[in-house]
Amino acid sequence: MATYDYRCPNDGDVEARFPLGEAPPTLPCPACGGAAGRVWSAPRLTRTPRALRTALDRAAASAETPQVVTRVPGRRPATPRASAHPAHSRLPRL
């Protein structure tokens, strides 16, 4: 089943589903009953959310040429912090 677009001059766009190759050239408008003519449009290419499309593109690119990383992205290397407790200053140093 394919989804076809029809346009009623009074009520706007209407979608209908028919088997491939069996869509009529006109369709009765469900709102007013007038003739809605079939319009040609691009396939539903823009229905994928942008974030999902970006993730899919990254996954496809990494399958061919994966990036080599030396640490987890977004994390900084650990830096030693000085303790604020006064007793720690008397501990032996290594």
Image (spheres, grey):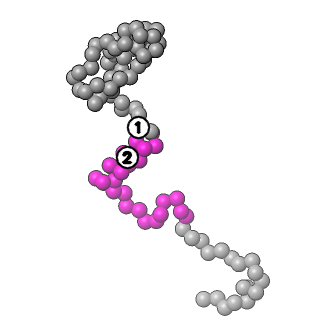
**Foreground disc of the pair 1, 2:** 1
Quadrant in the picture for residue 47: top left
Q: Quadrant of the C terminus?
A: bottom right
Q: How many residues crowd mark 1 within 10 Å: few (<14), some (14–19), many (20+)?
A: few
In the image, residue 83 sits, relative to residue 77, either above or below, namely below
Q: Is residue 70 magenta?
A: yes
Residue drawn where x is 38% and y is 22% of the image:
15
Label 1: state its secondary structure: loop
Q: Determine contact: label 1, label 2, CB under 8 Å.
A: yes
Residue 48: assigned label: 1
What's the residue type where badge 2 is placed? Leu
Q: Is residue 82 left or right of residue 86?
A: left
In the image, residue 20 sits, relative to residue 34, either above or below, namely below
Task: Specify start and end residues of the magenta stretch as a single range.
Answer: 50-76
Residue drawn where x is 36% and y is 45% of the image:
57
Residue drawn where x is 72% and y is 85% of the image:
88
Instruction: Quote the CA–CA distance across marks 1 and 2.
Output: 10 Å
Q: Is residue 18 left or right of residue 81?
A: left
